Image (cartoon, rainbow, N blue to C red):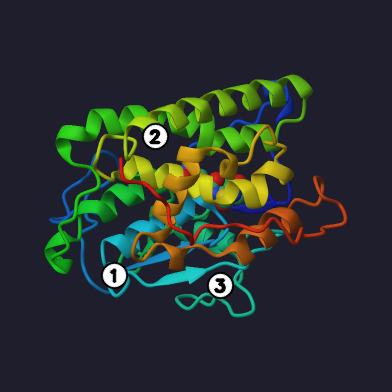
Amino acid sequence: MGLLVDGKWHDKWYDTAKHGGRFVREDARFRNWITADGSAGPGGSAGFTAEADRYHLYVSLACPWAHRTLIFRALKGLQELIPVSVVHPHMLASGWEFAPDPEPLHGSRFLHELYTRADDTYTGRVTVPVLWDKKQQTIVSNESAEIIRMFNGAFDHLTANTEDFCPIGLLPEIDRINEFVYHRVNNGVYRCGFATTQDAYEEAFHELFGALDELELLLGKSRYLVGDRLTEADWRLFTTLVRFDAVYFCHFKTNQRMISSYAHLQGYLKELYQYPGVRETVNFEHIKQHYFFSHGHMNPARIVPLGPVLDLDSPHGRHI
Ligand SMILES: N[C@@H](CCC(=O)N[C@@H](CS)C(=O)NCC(=O)O)C(=O)O
């Protein structure tokens, strides 16, 4: 686990000391947008036109951020257009690794090689997901929140799949919920797990469970987070909920309650898990292997727990 400094790999854990023991996630650095006509998107440069056989997605099946991109790739029928490579679940001294086989485009063994191929002076963390452009030989984006927005609309003219998880009229509410869920839930579990002081952990813990209580109330009245229509906001919450009982509850000490003990959140989680195409994007073997094995300072014997038994296939009972 580490980062690149001026294009050189350093094996180094997060520096929480400079934030009073709090884990603060770095902003992603590659922020271009694929658009239907190649015009610039909300950030970055123009020139990334939506085309077949041009882009490649690198993910970890363990990572909740990368998982969002796999879900949108499936929901939007992009599997043929955008091939995917999966890193090994164990992220060790050299960071994310392609094993047993190197990745197919350049024969790289490590994800950091793709970052330096795109920018040989890159400084920052080497994260998944990565959306690669074969034409310009660079990273389009390593920000999942933006990759899923591109997937939602940029390729519609090629796939004829016009399902819209970010309808314009609902965007302000989707963005409001995303902001709340990102800080308190998606990143909230990491803020609990990677805290290095008791105070930092407790602050994140209370924010997380306060948020889950609010979401439980909301989902008692509403089928989805933004009314009766499934939106991007739901998929962003889903990737954290689906890992919660299997990993975060124990490994990140987010152990006030399991998701399975909330009537509405659990039904909602099951409904999303059972949505066509989504179950296939969930890999509990990678999820558990990654967290419990990779974080040796948190779990020195690297024992991967066998439980808990999860029940995500039974009827979800959501008919609000
Ligand atoms: N903002 C990024 C965050 C991605 C991220 O932090 N991914 C984790 C995996 S769950 C990672 O690759 N971490 C490696 C590291 O921080 O060194 C996104 O949402 O795309």
Label 1 CA crowd tier, 10 Å (few <14, some 14–19, many 20+): some
- Cβ atoms under marks 1 and 3 closer than 8 Å: no
Query: Disc 1 to disc 3, how far (Cα)?
Result: 18 Å
Disc number for residue 101: none
Tell which residue pokes out farthest to the right in this image.
301
Which callout, 2 or 1, points to the residue nearer the camera?
2
Label 2 CA crowd tier, 10 Å (few <14, some 14–19, many 20+): many
Disc number for residue 219: 2
- Residue 265, relative to residue 239: is it above or below? above
Secondary structure beneath dot 1 equals loop
Q: Position of residue 156 (x, y in %)?
A: 16, 60
Q: Position of residue 154 (x, y in %)?
A: 20, 55
The amino acid on which the numbered mark 3 sits, given as a three-letter code, is Ser
Callout 1: CB less than 8 Å from ligand 1: no
Say if residue 122 shows up in the picture. Answer: no
- Residue 281, relative to residue 163: is it above or below? below
Q: For mark 3, what is the residue?
A: 108
Q: Residue at x 45, y 57 (%)?
A: 130
Which callout, 2 or 3, points to the residue nearer the camera?
2
The C terminus - image quarter: top left
Q: Position of residue 301 (x, y in %)?
A: 87, 56
The amino acid on which the numbered mark 1 sits, given as a three-letter code, is Arg
Query: Disc 2 to disc 3, how far (Cα)?
Result: 44 Å
Q: Residue at x 58, y 50 (%)?
A: 243
Query: Disc 2 to disc 1, how far (Cα)?
Result: 40 Å
- Cβ atoms under marks 2 and 3 closer than 8 Å: no
Label 3 CA crowd tier, 10 Å (few <14, some 14–19, many 20+): some
Q: Earlier in the sequence, mark 2 or mark 3?
A: 3
Callout 3: CB less than 8 Å from ligand 1: no
Residue 206: image quadrant is top right
